[in-house]
């Protein structure tokens, strides 16, 4: 059954995404609950984009600290699978820290920013250029590394 759900998770994700983006019944709580359950189902079965979208929704729009922490956990799973948006968000989360579950960690922050920037995420590219220009996140100022990231802005 788990293998079947893993195979169907892309379909479940796109169904959830379509329901979530519908203009029709925009303020319906039932529609929102259904979309979130479908996102969760696809995310729990390892779909990278579902992990990213569901994690983002929980972390930035969820009610309560527990939902926000759970959202960050989903985002970290998506980032570890290579999703550039999730990598950038995890860079920010580890740079600033979030609750007791994600203490500030400059090395992890730099790691996730670099992963996102290598995939041409514009905010991550800009952040890495600033990091190397100003010598932030435990790095010394390095004009050559800053220039490496500036041309792709």
Image (spheres, rainbow, N blue to C red):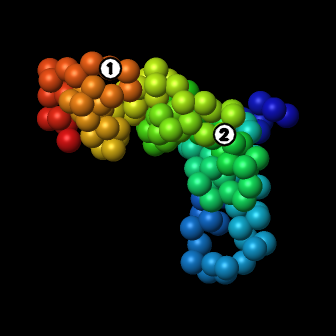
- Which image quadrant is residue 8 in? top right
For the N terminus, the image quarter is: top right
| Disc on the earlier residue, 2 or 1 | 2
Q: Is residue 18 above or below residue 1?
A: below
Q: On residue 107, which mark appears?
A: none
Residue occupying the far right of the picture:
1
For the C terminus, the image quarter is: top left
- Which image quadrant is residue 136 in? top left
Residue 31 at x, y percent in the picture: 73, 71
The answer to whether 37 appears left or right of 137 in the picture is: right
Residue in the picture at 58% in, 50% down: 56
Q: Which of 109/119 is in front?
A: 109
Q: On residue 139, which mark appears?
A: 1
Q: Which residue is mark 2?
A: 99
Residue 29 at x, y percent in the picture: 75, 74
- Residue 39 seen in the current view: yes
Residue in the picture at 59% in, 54% down: 60
Residue in the picture at 69% in, 33% down: 101
Residue 59 at x, y percent in the picture: 63, 50
Residue in the picture at 66% in, 45% down: 71
- Residue 148 seen in the current view: no
Q: Please, what secondary structure does the residue beneath circle 1 have? A: loop
Q: Which of 4/59 is in front?
A: 59
């Amino acid at each position: 059954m788990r293998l079947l759900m893993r195979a169907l998770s892309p379909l479940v994700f796109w169904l959830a995404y379509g329901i979530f983006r519908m203009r029709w019944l925009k303020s319906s709580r039932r529609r929102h609950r259904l979309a979130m359950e479908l996102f969760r189902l696809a995310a729990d079965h390892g779909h990278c984009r579902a992990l990213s979208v569901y994690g983002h929704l929980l972390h930035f729009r969820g009610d309560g600290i527990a939902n926000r922490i759970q959202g960050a956990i989903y985002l970290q799973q998506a980032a570890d699978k290579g999703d550039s948006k999730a990598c950038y968000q995890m860079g920010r989360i580890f740079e600033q820290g979030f609750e007791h579950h994600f203490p500030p960690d400059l090395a992890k922050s730099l790691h996730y920013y670099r992963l996102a920037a290598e995939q041409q995420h514009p905010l991550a590219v800009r952040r890495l250029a600033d990091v190397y220009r100003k010598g932030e996140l435990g790095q010394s100022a390095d004009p050559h590394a800053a220039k490496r990231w500036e041309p792709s802005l």
